[in-house]
Image (tube, rainbow, N blue to C red):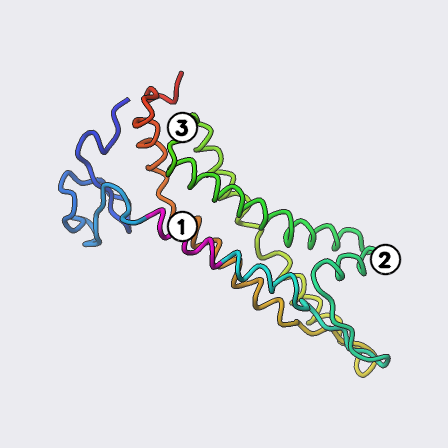
Amino acid sequence: MKTAKDAGLARCSSCGTLTDRPGERCPICGADTYVRRPHSLQRVWAFWIAGVLAYIPGNVLPIMVTQSVAGDSPSTIISGVIALIHHGSFEIAAVIFIASIVVPVSKFIIIAWLALSIQRGWSLSEHRRHLAHELVELIGRWSMIDVFVVAALAALIQVGALMSILPGAGVNAFAMSVIFTMLSAMSFDPRLIWDNGALEGEPKNGGH
């Protein structure tokens, strides 16, 4: 199977139009055109590292603070999940745990695995790499669920002077981690998957 690169075609970075004049402006919208996105993997790693660094305080710092007559009670993500389970809110606890721990960690691992497999030329099928990239796109849609849950709790649980819930500093750090991870995934040029397969000597149809 012949690729667009083999045919000397470039893709518009804005509208996706294919053109046979790489490096020139898109004839449709005037944006830049690239055969492959410049410095794609470097951007992936830069945003990935920033996301990991922001994820640490996002889990260590309080994600919400419960204010009541008994005093302030800060909660990290894990302690908040445990508290919700203790109070019988299993569904909310599961949502926060999956969105705050399972999804981000899975996304970090898959992005790193995908980038390393391209850089080091691991002997993997193009189809497997493509599935990994699709999985990153899928789970990335649920990355901000726990931030929305905390915001909803803060808006709903305001019982006068008796009790209220306020977002903690961990929310900001976690939100930044999600944003950096999204940028890391968006920086990856999936067309590198097919280039890498060609360099490994795999058939262009993914090995079938």
Q: Is residue 4 left or right of residue 98?
A: left
In primary-sequence order, the first of circles 1 and 2 is: 1
Residue 121 is a magenta residue: no
In primary-sequence order, the first of circles 2 and 3 is: 2
Q: Is residue 106 left or right of residue 24?
A: right
Q: CA distance from mark 2 to mark 3?
A: 46 Å
- 200 and 192: which is toward the camera: 200
Q: Which mark is residue 86?
A: 2
Quadrant location of residue 62?
A: bottom right
Callout 2 touching callout 3 (CB < 8 Å)? no
Q: How many marks?
A: 3
Residue 49 is a magenta residue: yes
Q: Position of residue 14 (x, y in %)?
A: 28, 51
Q: Which residue is mark 1?
A: 44
Is residue 92 depicted above or below 126 in this figure?
below
Q: CA distance from mark 1 to mark 2?
A: 39 Å
Q: Position of residue 208 (x, y in %)?
A: 40, 16
Q: Position of residue 7 (x, y in %)?
A: 18, 30
Dot 2 crowding, Cα within 10 Å, few <14, some 14–19, many 20+ = few
Dot 3 crowding, Cα within 10 Å, few <14, some 14–19, many 20+ = many
What type is the residue that disc 3 sits on?
Answer: Glu
Q: Which residue is mark 3?
A: 126
Instruction: Residue at 37%, 53% (x, y): give it.
Output: 43
Residue mark closest to the camera, 1 vs 2: 1
* Most frequent secondary structure within the magenta stretch: helix
Callout 1 touching callout 3 (CB < 8 Å)? no
- Residue segment shown in magenta: 40-50
